Image (cartoon, rainbow, N blue to C red):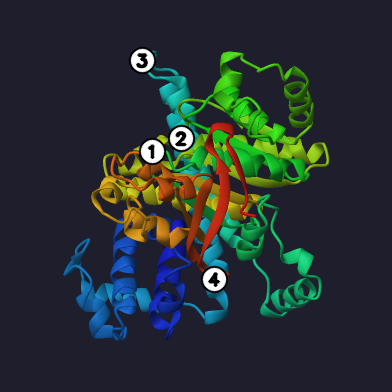
Amino acid sequence: MSEVDTEMSLLGSLIATEGALEYSAGLIKPEWFSEPILRYIYEQCTKLAEAGHRLSPPTVIAAMPEDIAGVPRNQFYAHLTRESLPVSMIGGMLQTVKDRWARRVLTEMGQSVIEQSQMHGADPYEVASRSMSMIDTVMEVQAEKSGSSLADAGKQFFEDITNPDNLKGDTTGLRILDNKLNGFRRGQLYVVAGRPGMGKSAFMCSTARRTALSGAGVLIFSLEMTRQEIFARMAADQIDWTKAPGFGDLLRGDLKGMDDHVGNAYEALRKAPMHIDDSARLTFAEIAAKARRLKAEMEMHGVRLGTIWIDHMGLVTPSDRYAGNKVAEAGEVSGRARALAKELDCCVILLCQLSRDVEKRDDKRPVMSDLRWSGEIEQDAHVIGFLFREEYYLAQDANADLGALADARWKLDFLIRKNRNGETADCRLWCSIAHSSIRDNL
């Protein structure tokens, strides 16, 4: 059966089988249809189904163009439904249509790579990045292919709840967050957001350090800080003493006579299963490709990848697909981050900047609407936490009460505002920003 014939049979079967289009709306992507008119009819029919309309023959015919390649739409509808096959065959046709789409994408990509690689004006690395983005699109669909029966899922669930350790994620190094979030859970996307100065970098470095020291593999993609800056923060935190040199001192080479302590911190961190990529410019396709390779390398050494940190979301280079559309670009990054967490069976943590609207309010504590392009991020994230330090704002207020300022020192709030598998909460932590240290509040 030719490609178009298979697509005609699939679409005809979906239209002719009651309830099939409603069910398939989230499983079949319009671009899988190679024939534009079939793609258009499928899109129109799914919109009708999602809006609650019954897909009767008059409704479907009315959604079609009046004339399709010289054939009146009522005749085209009749031809479509004549091509329909039994319900038992829909799954096989769907897989065939999806596989042929994947082959088309890969063929087009291969031809494009050959053509562009021979053009002297083309940047070979840009060509490679776009190619990886297309491959990621195919891989995401493949990841959706896997599944299990309800009975299998139920069996796994009961095995897990009888052994609660199976349900725990990798440690955050903070008891209160491990309790509220169950750690950094595999297959989930966490978003940690805050205004500048709230401690996002400190939170990443301190928690990632302790996750790695617990034995779980950690990848950090730092588009903002260099690996030297990250190591200095982790070393200052590792020494765990507020009178020790801060990370700024270490970056200046001022060890404050504590060479032995700094050396011990280096030895401890050197053995941690952690990789830091401080490339200044990365697309998400490049992040995903590197993460897959590094996960494989860790597994060769007996280390399971636990967390991937991306610092920060706004610095990830968007693909050309949604050029200039900031909302769609944000959705692409958060959506791909969520898919990567599921594919690699790890927790992906996106650091995110909040909008300046926070600064315009008397109450500076963040709310969900302060997230830039919040709708996309809210939809994709399993957990959203805001970082807030009252001391930062009091220190800038000439009329601030000195007692309140002293009381706010060393305090950091982690505000859980979305927790798909648990409760929201305000978690009080202890922090020393100079040492990039975050601890449980005693």
Q: Amino acid at mark 4?
A: Glu
Residue assigned mark 3: 121
Question: Is disc 3 placed on a helix, strand or loop?
Answer: loop
Mark 3 residue type: Gly
The residue that mark 4 highlights is 423
Q: Earlier in the sequence, mark 4 or mark 3?
A: 3
- The alpha-carbon separation of the residues under discs 1 and 3 comes to 21 Å
For marks 3 and 2, give the one nearer the viewer: 2
| C-alpha gap between disc 1 and disc 4 | 33 Å
Depth check, mark 1 against mark 4: the one in front is 4
- Marker disc for residue 28: none
Kind of residue at badge 1: Pro
Height in image: 59 above or below 267?
below
What crowding class fits label 2: few (fewer than 14 Cα within 10 Å), some (14-19), or many (20 or more)?
some
- The residue that label 1 is drawn on is 318
Residue at x 75%, y 41% (from the top left corner): 213
Query: Considering the image in quadrants, where does the C terminus appear?
Result: bottom right
Q: Label 3 crowding class (10 Å Cα cut-off): few <14, some 14-19, many 20+?
A: few
